[in-house]
Image (cartoon, coloured by chain):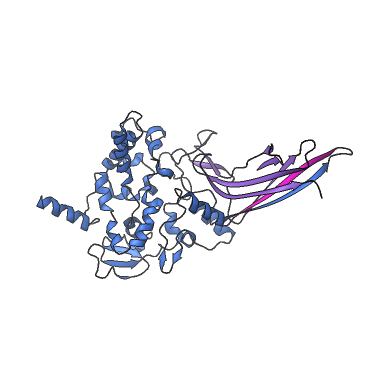
């Protein structure tokens, strides 16, 4: 989730990651690769019939009353740089009523 | 020349008759070669060719995913000649026909190919040849429609060598096919449990290092079914067009656009925002934006999984 001021300056950025996480069970380090994984120790995956809810709070800098929020959901294949886009939403959010 | 041609014809015509196991990659590939299915099932064959079942040893984007197995895992080899079927536990799902129909020499040949393909100083043509060799090993029609088609062997017996298992009983083909002469209805081919043979439930404890790869079927059983789901893997990953099931088995991770579309259909994202000033205590207003996101997964299993 990225928040930018209306003139394009980045104010805030945060990421959440959803995936099963496995170790070899020989130590505490998470590993990739079926040949290395022995069991899951944590699972933040998107589960069937469950809603994954997140809240991001962004404190606005002095004098900023509006910002552009972009939320992107993507699937990272093997490496973070290899993204398959799923959804992208952009909203302008203002303090003004 | 004549006797060599005759021998080759016999091998092609009767892939599962020979009781001897394959000694080479070429022999194993020939044993399960399904190109003859294309004659009558061209559309389905064309779909399968695009699927990951046609390239089970080639990772996403065409990499040789088993290089780390032989080079750096608990199953690593000092030399390719030390390879055996046991040093490739991945075969259980990625090449099940090797487990039942190959000798250790096939493992040695594959290990050599992986070694060459990952050798920094190997000539590019050797690397390409090694990759092409690994690419010959596929989950072909015969693997699913014969080798893996019967789960309940104690009551139904082993798959018969001249039978293609599918949706119905009867002669196979018109005129009848010379190799697979009969069709028989498989009890499980259309059920999720069939896919579960390979698409995993959890750690594979039968190996001397319990590897864990795909756990889709476990997720399906314990999470999706447990929450009231009724659909099968085939309902979403082999959608029917008329009487035919889609044999591309999406997603195809090498087709980003189609995969993106499939993921977008299965996962929804709702975003709500609020701009206001939070008051911690008198006089201490903090202007802020709050973003709430809600993601729902409509698939029959966790995402991601494999």
Chain A: drawing colour: purple
Residue B281 seen in the figure: yes
Residue B83 appears anywhere in the view: no
> Which quarter of the figure has residue A5?
top right
Quadrant in the rendering for residue A28 = top right
The answer to if B291 sits in the magenta stretch is yes
Residue B230 x %, y %: 53, 63
Residue reaching furthest to the front = A7
Q: Is residue B86 left or right of residue A22?
A: left
Q: Position of residue B107 (x, y in %)?
A: 30, 41
As drawn, which residue projects farthest toward the left? B2
How many numbered dots are placed on residues in this image? 0
* Vertical arrangement, residue B75 with respect to residue B156, above or below: above
Q: Which residues are magenta?
A: B279-299
Which quarter of the rendering shows the N terminus of chain A? top right
Residue sitting farthest toward the top: B121
Q: Is residue B43 left or right of residue A86?
A: left
Give residue B282's position: percent from left, percent from top: 89, 39
What kind of secondary structure does the magenta stretch mostly adopt?
A: strand
Name the one closer to the observer, B56 or B232.
B56
B187 sits left or right of B272 in the view: left
Q: Residue at x 36, y 46 (%)?
A: B91
Q: Is residue A94 magenta?
A: no
Q: Is residue B171 left or right of residue B243?
A: left
Residue found at x 70% / y 44%: A68
Residue B239 screen position, x and y as percent: 46, 63
In the rendered image of the structure, the colour used to display chain B is blue
- Vertical side of A9 occupied by B203: above or below: below
């Amino acid at each position: 989730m990225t928040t930018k001021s209306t003139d394009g300056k980045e104010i805030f950025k945060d990421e959440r990651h959803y995936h099963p996480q496995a170790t070899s069970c020989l130590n505490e380090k998470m590993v990739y690769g079926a040949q290395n994984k022995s069991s899951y120790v944590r699972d933040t995956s998107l589960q069937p019939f469950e809603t994954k809810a997140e809240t991001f709070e962004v404190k606005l800098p002095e004098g900023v009353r509006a910002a552009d929020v972009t939320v992107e959901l993507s699937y990272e294949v093997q490496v973070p740089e290899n993204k398959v886009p799923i959804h992208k939403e952009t909203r302008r959010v203002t303090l003004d009523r | 020349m004549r006797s060599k041609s005759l021998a080759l014809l016999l091998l092609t015509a009767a892939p599962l008759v020979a009781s001897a196991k394959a000694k080479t990659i070429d022999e194993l590939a020939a044993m399960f070669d399904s190109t003859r299915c294309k004659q009558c099932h061209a559309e389905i064959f064309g779909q399968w060719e695009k699927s990951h079942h046609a390239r089970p040893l080639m990772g996403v984007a065409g990499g040789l995913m088993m290089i780390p197995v032989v080079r750096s895992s608990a199953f690593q080899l000092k030399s390719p000649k030390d390879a055996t079927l046991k040093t490739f536990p991945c075969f259980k799902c990625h090449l099940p026909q090797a487990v039942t129909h190959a000798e250790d020499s096939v493992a040695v040949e594959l290990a050599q190919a992986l070694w060459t393909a990952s050798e920094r100083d190997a000539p590019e043509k050797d690397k390409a040849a090694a990759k092409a060799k690994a690419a010959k090993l596929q989950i072909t029609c015969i693997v699913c429609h014969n080798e893996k088609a019967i789960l309940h062997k104690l009551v139904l017996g082993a798959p018969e060598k001249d039978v293609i298992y599918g949706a119905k009983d009867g002669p196979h083909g018109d005129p009848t096919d010379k190799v697979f002469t009969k069709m028989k209805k498989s009890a499980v081919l259309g059920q999720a449990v069939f896919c579960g043979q390979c698409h995993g439930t959890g750690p594979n404890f039968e190996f001397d290092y319990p590897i864990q790869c795909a756990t889709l079927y476990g997720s399906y059983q314990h999470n999706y079914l447990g929450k009231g789901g009724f659909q099968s893997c085939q309902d979403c990953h082999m959608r029917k067009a008329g009487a035919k099931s889609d044999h591309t088995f999406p997603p195809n991770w090498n087709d980003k656009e189609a995969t993106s579309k499939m993921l977008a259909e299965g996962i929804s994202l709702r975003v709500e925002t609020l701009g206001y000033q939070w008051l911690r205590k008198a006089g201490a207003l903090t202007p802020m934006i709050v973003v709430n996101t809600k993601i729902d997964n409509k698939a029959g299993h966790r995402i991601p999984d494999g």
